[in-house]
Amino acid sequence: MESGMGSGRDWMRFLRGPAARWLAPGIDLLYPPQCGICRREPPVSAGTGPPAWPAAGVCAECTRELAVDVSRCPRCGTPGTGDGCRRCARAGPPWRSITILTSYGGPVRDAVLRAKRPAGTRVAAGLAALLVQRHGARLAAAGHDGVVPVPMHWLRRALRGCSAADDLAIGIAAATGRRVRRVLVRRRATRMQNELPVGDRPANVRDAFGCRHGLGGAKLLLVDDVVTTGATLAACCRALVAAGAAVVDVAVVASADSSVDD
């Protein structure tokens, strides 16, 4: 007859619960936690304790470098504008709002490019943590039913071995208490947006996305790494709305305000 820790399931609960809490300080001493962006170890805390975890898994220096931005239109993200954005007064994007961590360039550009590589999962998690740390109240107030990553075509995903948008969505969902909903599919392999003139980008992704099923009035947060023209996000947003989404908001790490990536 089994009792106490008799079953394998009980042992798994023990290892994930009390044992994990007891072992964590020793593990931190042997393998100090690192900043998710720069991989530096945090400073040793006072006394004999283990190194202190950096806030949100990102060191103070990276936070200062990456979580600084200009004022933006909350609808389209145009820098230097507010609620009276002229661009949105003429024709706003199909989403309700956009949340942006910072401008694309310098350290954030390096971090985004690293997040696109197979070994970049921790970098993506760090960027997601910074975005939620800075804009958590806004994201929480939106009351999203799920977090949706912009999908890659299956062939490109297989060749690259990872998806930065997917990793970012996982991090944002975990930090906000939402679930990842991979409802979007890429119907066809499109050319890379940054290979095309700005004017050709909307046509490149037109009807390139669809949904796996109806969305029944869901409020969704669409996530990608970088936005320039917004053509890809707009195409995804239209697919979500066509499938029944009531609200689509957007969150990205960076806005390429004067760059050529999308």
Image: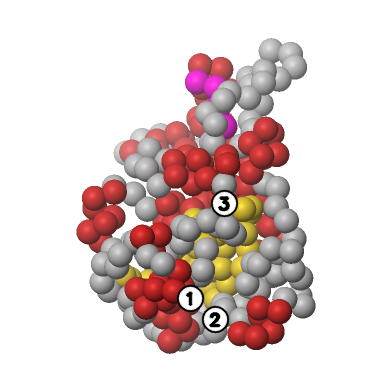
Between disc 1 and disc 2, whose residue precedes? 2
Color encoding of the figure:
secondary structure
Q: Eyeballing the image, is 91 above or below 26?
A: below
Q: Eyeballing the image, is 121 above or below 192?
A: above
Residue 25 located within the stretch drawn in magenta: no
Between disc 3 and disc 1, whose residue precedes? 3
x then y, percent, for residue 133: 67, 50
Q: Which residue is under mark 1?
A: 234
User: Which residue is situated farthest in the top direction here?
Assistant: 48
Instruction: Name the dominant secondary structure of the magenta segment.
Output: loop
Please report contact status of discs 1 and 2: CB closer than 8 Å, yes or no: yes
Q: Eyeballing the image, is 31 above or below 55?
A: above
User: Depth-wise, is mark 3 or mark 2 nearer the camera?
Assistant: 3
At numbered mark 1, what does the secondary structure look like: helix, strand or loop? helix
Q: Which residue is under mark 3?
A: 104
Between disc 3 and disc 2, whose residue precedes? 2
User: Depth-wise, is mark 3 or mark 1 nearer the camera?
Assistant: 3
Could you tell me the amino acid type at mark 2? Pro
Crowdedness near tag 1: few (<14), some (14–19) or many (≥20) residues, C-alpha within 10 Å:
some
- Residue at (61% x, 81% y) in the render: 92
Q: Eyeballing the image, is 194 above or below 61?
A: below
- Magenta extent: 31-35
- Residue at (66% x, 78% y) in the render: 87
Could you tell me the amino acid type at mark 3? Tyr
- Residue at (45% x, 34% y) in the render: 15
Q: Which residue is under mark 2?
A: 94
